[in-house]
Image (cartoon, rainbow, N blue to C red):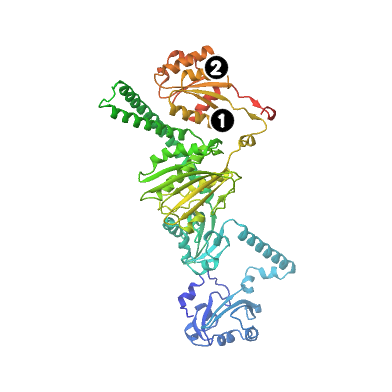
């Protein structure tokens, strides 16, 4: 194989040292099958005391014997090998001290490649620093050996135990040296990194390539190096990793870039945390805005609903306006219910587990999802014929389901069908592409299936990795399915995916069926007894959302939708209510009277009035007088809980014997 002089010079761009006259670095030559010189580096020609032009076509070994005749016998005894690596000494250095060299020969059918370089600095050069005097003593040599061994051990420990990558790069960005973690992060063997300059740009994320180029240029100007974060993509799996890089350029005296030194550190988890903090801050701000808008819209729709009911009741059967008013009533009622579902989602907080029926969760979400996805996509629910009890974080579970539904909708740009199916399995079936752990039996399964474009088989193993996404640029964070994996892991369950490209995909969430002992296992030996609350109100949607919010906070809630129902629950004595929460809407005189009657009849019961869309000045003064606590409509969830806890008596503590 023939190579040009420029290619030979590019094989080693490490800094050159100007030491003693016998010092050789960058000595390389290409020989033909007869040992004649095809190409030779200037450094090797000068060391052989000839010119590169005069060596062309001449026997390399004859020129070497003239320069170092004592090597003829030593090299003649070497076995015939295709690869030779031989340390040599030449006893003609300054002061009579030997010079140390390393000869490397690679032989192929077309010829051979020779590299000859100095292995140790000449002793005469060291003597300028008085090292020869120190090295002449036995104790000094022992100490030097111990220091070298200690340094090698520390370097080996750093290279193999450092969680990141230590590397040196040539000027063309091929790697001269790199620790083993480079192959693990990128999926490319170290041997390829050392010979293929373009490998670096093949793993750098395409959106970060310009930034990395600027960072490399800045490193040539900053003497201390530069640091920056960018993404790299695994060549085999496509997994994206964020790396923090510190890079420093190695420059010649003339300013020519000889190479780079640097380190990589995987900071993917830190980046995920930063993304979540940023997203949480924005979601908190968005929640405040949308909650206010939702309440205002709900009040508007409540007025439309009331007027339509009033006018419809006054019309005679068969009136021309009857059909239109009935449609207005139906549409306003649907809008009112939809808004309350949205408010219900905002009221919920993650982190609290409760018992729930998966079939009911799906039933509540189907109508909401139907409003979120395009009309060209049909959606249907196929619940199991039996209740499916779960002990789970219901708020986070809803977020996971909605995310899976939105992903499925994006996979069907031309339309299709989205199916949510629930089922119960006595044993966990054999499944592929499982993430999480196999749940205990019996197992509850939720399958979210679409008829979209499907997922490529090579992507199935990476779908749940953080920042991995198959969506177009800037249209996906790559954290949705990763959060799904975290959810099932926290609930001792699993998530699986099956897909046929061009036919659709199915994501299945597998969770253990609740046996109603989970809460007792989670609770400590001395647990706080759940307080029971009676929740009274006339707006069905608002009552449901408020009850769900209170249950998420650990209260046992019994609802009453009328004054008579509330008084009947209290008179029955079936529950020891710690308090009564009355939800008052504008101009609700019936429940206002309930507050006054409760104070007269049940003096020991705490009464909390929650205002829904009305100001305290609009209330009957007697209601303000008889209520133990007033909760305005503009408070946050945390402030609502503080007022509720302030009004209610301290919960009782029960021991294991009392359970």
Apparent side of residue 147 relative to residue 483 in the rendered image (left or right): right
Vertical order, 149 against 549 (above or below): below
Q: Residue furthest left?
A: 320
Q: Nearer the viewer, residue 17 or 7?
A: 7
| Residue name at image x 49 percent, y 13 percent | 597
| Residue name at image x 43 percent, y 19 percent | 616
**Which structural element holds mark 2?**
helix
| Picture mark count | 2
User: How far separated are the C-alphas under marks 1 and 2?
Assistant: 24 Å
Q: Nearer the viewer, residue 508 or 252?
A: 508
Image quadrant where residue 593 sits = top left
Vertical order, 80 against 599 (above or below): below
Provide residue 155's location: percent of width, then percent of height. 63, 61
**Which structural element holds mark 1?**
loop
Provide residue 455's location: percent of width, then percent of height. 45, 55
Vertical order, 512 against 597 (above or below): below
Q: Quadrant of the C terminus?
A: top right
Q: Residues within 10 Å of mark 1 (few under 14, many from 20)?
A: some
Vertical order, 659 against 193 (above or below): above
Provide residue 147's location: percent of width, then percent of height. 68, 63
| Residue name at image x 58 percent, y 21 percent | 574
Image quadrant where residue 101 sits = bottom right
Task: Check disc 1 and report the residue beneath it.
Answer: 554
The answer to whether residue 166 of the structure is visible from this angle is no
Of the image marks 1 and 2, the number of the one nearer the N terminus: 1
The answer to whether residue 396 of the structure is visible from this angle is yes
Provide residue 124's location: percent of width, then percent of height. 63, 74
Q: Residue furthest right?
A: 138
Q: Residues within 10 Å of mark 2 (few under 14, many from 20)?
A: few
Q: Nearer the viewer, residue 371 or 300?
A: 371
Task: Check disc 2 and report the residue beneath it.
Answer: 571
């Amino acid at each position: 194989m023939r190579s040009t002089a420029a290619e030979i010079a590019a094989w080693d761009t490490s800094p050159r040292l100007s030491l003693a006259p016998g010092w050789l670095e960058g000595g390389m030559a290409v020989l033909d099958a007869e040992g004649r010189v095809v190409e030779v580096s200037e450094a090797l020609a000068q060391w052989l005391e000839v010119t590169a032009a005069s060596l062309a076509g001449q026997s390399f070994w004859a020129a070497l014997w003239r320069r170092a005749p004592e090597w003829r016998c030593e090299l003649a005894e070497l076995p015939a090998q295709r690869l030779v690596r031989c340390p040599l000494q030449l006893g003609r250095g300054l002061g009579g001290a030997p010079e140390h060299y390393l000869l490397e020969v690679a032989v192929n059918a077309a010829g051979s490649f020779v590299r000859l370089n100095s292995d140790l600095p000449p002793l005469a050069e060291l003597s300028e620093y008085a090292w020869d005097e120190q090295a002449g003593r036995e104790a000094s040599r022992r100490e030097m050996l111990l220091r070298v061994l200690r340094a090698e051990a520390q370097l080996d420990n750093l290279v193999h135990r450092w969680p990141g990558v230590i590397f040196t790069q040539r000027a063309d960005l091929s790697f001269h040296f790199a620790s083993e973690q480079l192959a693990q992060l990128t999926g490319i063997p170290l041997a390829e990194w050392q010979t293929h300059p373009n490998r670096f740009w093949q793993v750098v994320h395409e959106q970060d390539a310009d930034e990395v180029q600027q960072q490399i240029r800045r490193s040539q100007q900053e003497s201390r190096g530069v640091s920056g974060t960018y993404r790299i993509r695994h060549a085999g799996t496509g997994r994206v990793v964020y790396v923090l890089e510190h890079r420093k350029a190695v420059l010649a005296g003339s300013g020519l870039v000889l190479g780079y030194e640097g380190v990589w550190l995987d900071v993917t988890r830190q980046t995920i945390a930063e993304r979540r903090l940023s997203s949480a801050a924005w979601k908190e701000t968005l929640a405040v805005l949308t909650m206010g808008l939702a309440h205002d819209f709900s009040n508007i729709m409540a007025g439309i609903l009331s007027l339509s009911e009033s006018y419809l009741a006054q019309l005679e059967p068969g009136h021309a306006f009857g059909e239109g008013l009935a449609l207005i009533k139906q549409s306003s009622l649907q809008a009112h219910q939809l808004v309350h579902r949205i408010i219900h989602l905002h009221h919920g907080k993650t982190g609290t587990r409760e018992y729930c029926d998966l079939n009911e969760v799906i039933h509540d979400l189907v109508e909401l999802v139907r409003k979120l996805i395009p009309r060209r996509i049909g959606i249907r629910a196929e619940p199991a014929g039996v209740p499916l009890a779960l002990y789970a974080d219901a708020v986070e579970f809803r977020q996971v389901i909605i995310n899976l539904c939105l992903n499925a909708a994006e996979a069907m740009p031309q339309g299709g069908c989205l199916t949510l199916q629930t089922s119960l399995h006595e044993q966990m079936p054999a499944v592929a592409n499982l993430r999480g752990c196999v749940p205990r039996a019996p197992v509850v399964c939720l399958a979210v299936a679409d008829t979209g474009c499907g997922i490529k088989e090579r992507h199935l193993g990476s779908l749940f990795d953080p920042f991995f996404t198959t969506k177009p640029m800037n249209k996906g964070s790559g954290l949705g399915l990763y959060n799904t994996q975290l959810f099932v892991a926290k609930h001792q369950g699993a998530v699986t995916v099956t897909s046929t490209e061009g036919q659709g995909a199915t994501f299945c969430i597998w969770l253990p069926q609740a046996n109603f002992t989970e809460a007792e296992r989670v609770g400590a030996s001395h647990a706080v007894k759940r307080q029971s609350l009676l929740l009274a109100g006339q707006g069905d949607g608002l009552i449901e959302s408020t009850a769900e919010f209170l249950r998420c906070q650990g209260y046992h809630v019994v609802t009453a939708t009328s004054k008579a129902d509330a008084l009947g629950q209290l008179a029955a004595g079936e529950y020891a209510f710690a308090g009564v929460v009355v939800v008052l809407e504008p101009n609700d005189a019936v429940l206002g009277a309930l507050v006054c009657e409760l104070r007269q009849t049940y003096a020991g019961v705490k009464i909390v009035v929650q205002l829904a869309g009305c100001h305290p000045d609009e209330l009957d003064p007697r209601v303000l007088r008889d209520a133990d606590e007033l909760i305005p409509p503009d408070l946050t969830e945390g402030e609502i809980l503080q007022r509720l806890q302030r009004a209610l008596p301290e919960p009782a503590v029960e021991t294991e014997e009392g359970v």
